[in-house]
Amino acid sequence: MRVLTGGVAHVAGVVEQDLFDRETGLRKQHVEGLADAVACALSCRSANTAEWQAVLPRRNVDDKSKERYLSRLLANPLIAPLAVMQGFIPELAEMARSNGKTVILPLDQSKTADGFECLMLSLRTGERALPVAWKVKETNGGMGFAVQKALLDAAFAMMPEGVAVLLLGDRFYGTAALIRWCQEHGWGYRLRLRDNLILHHEGGELTTGEAAQAGMTALHNASLSESGVTTPIGILHEKGHSEPWIIALSEPPSQGRVLDYGMRWGIEPLFSDFKSRGFGITKTQLKHPDRIERLILVLTIALYWAASTGMQPKPTRHTQKNKPVA
């Protein structure tokens, strides 16, 4: 029997009501299960489902039954993380773009468990970031553009109309394919380039590293190898740093625009929240990518609630209208 009173149960009830107010595509029983898991994650501050069992708001149910319940929840294909995030991201993007600001989307990859990597697209909020879309694969290497494109297409569909977006990515993501995608979809970008990338510029050929060594700070019309993709490039090598920043830009080069790339670090505290300084996801015993993705969904909603504590509550379809004073 589901417990409806008490600390964890109260948090689960509040999260459940919020999920009902969003367009997530979830059925009632899935909303209840997801809300319970989020409340457990917040209570335990852990991604360990064995710890969740101890606080799961169920009465007169043995540990084995709780274990099976959580296992079925994380294995349920009807709980689609991208669909659920469609109920959160438009709201976060509207908040992020208030007063004409640009929505900042850092992209990066990180280990989630032994043999598993997670490609994460996030939305910067303050000095941190919250997840937008992610993909987990059993690999020890990087995920190519095909996986990146799926996440970017999903995020593009979630963005409110007319929002200005700036995509930030490390040197692994500075590819012609990703730059072309940004140009075709009208997104700004600050993508770091490798120093061995061949460029065609002003009738000549050179590598990005050679351009940096020559003291060049701006290339206004550089073509990336034989791809036909042309982009401005800014280069900044500050004293005391061993390597320069070689950044593909969506606008004409300037030092300030190159420094925009530094906002990418907002995703690092997010990874820390998931890992050793937070939920400890790297210790999960889950061995299926789709289950790890749903585990990340639980932690993402938990992070959303942790980050939104104290914010002005948004109106919902259940919010009572103020009655006129008699």
Image (tube, rainbow, N blue to C red):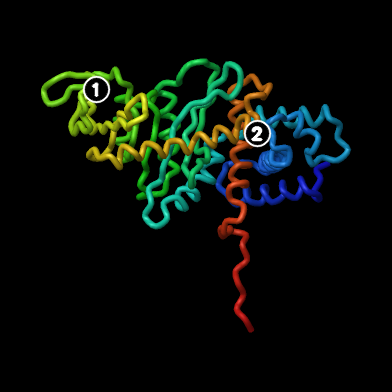
Element on which disc 1 rests: helix
Say which mark, if any, is on residue 279. Answer: 2
Horizontally, is 175 left or right of 92 in the view?
A: left
Q: Position of residue 105 (x, y in %)?
A: 42, 39
Q: Is residue 159 left or right of residue 219?
A: right
Residue 91: x, y in percent?
50, 50
306 lies left or right of 254: right
- The amino acid beneath tag 1 is Gln
Q: Residue furthest left?
A: 203
C-alpha separation, residue under disc 2 versus residue under disc 1: 43 Å
Q: Is residue 142 above or below residue 56?
A: above
Residue drawn at point x = 42 percent, y = 55 percent: 98
> Which is nearer the N-term, disc 2 or disc 1?
1
Q: Nearer the viewer, residue 146 or 107?
A: 107
Quadrant hosting residue 166: top left
- Local crowd at mark 1 within 10 Å, few (<14), some, or many (≥20)? few
Nearer to me, 92 or 191: 191
Mark 2 or mark 1, whichever is nearer to me: 1
Label 2 crowd bin: few (<14), some (14–19), many (20+), radius 10 Å? many
Q: Is residue 227 visible?
A: no
The image shows residue 146, relative to residue 79, as above or below, that is: above
Please tell me whether residue 81 is drawn above or below residue 288 in the rendered image: below
* Residue bearing mark 1: 213
Q: Quadrant of residue 232?
A: top left
Quadrant in which residue 287 is drawn: top right
Which residue: 41% across, 21% down?
144
Q: Nearer the viewer, residue 165 or 319?
A: 165
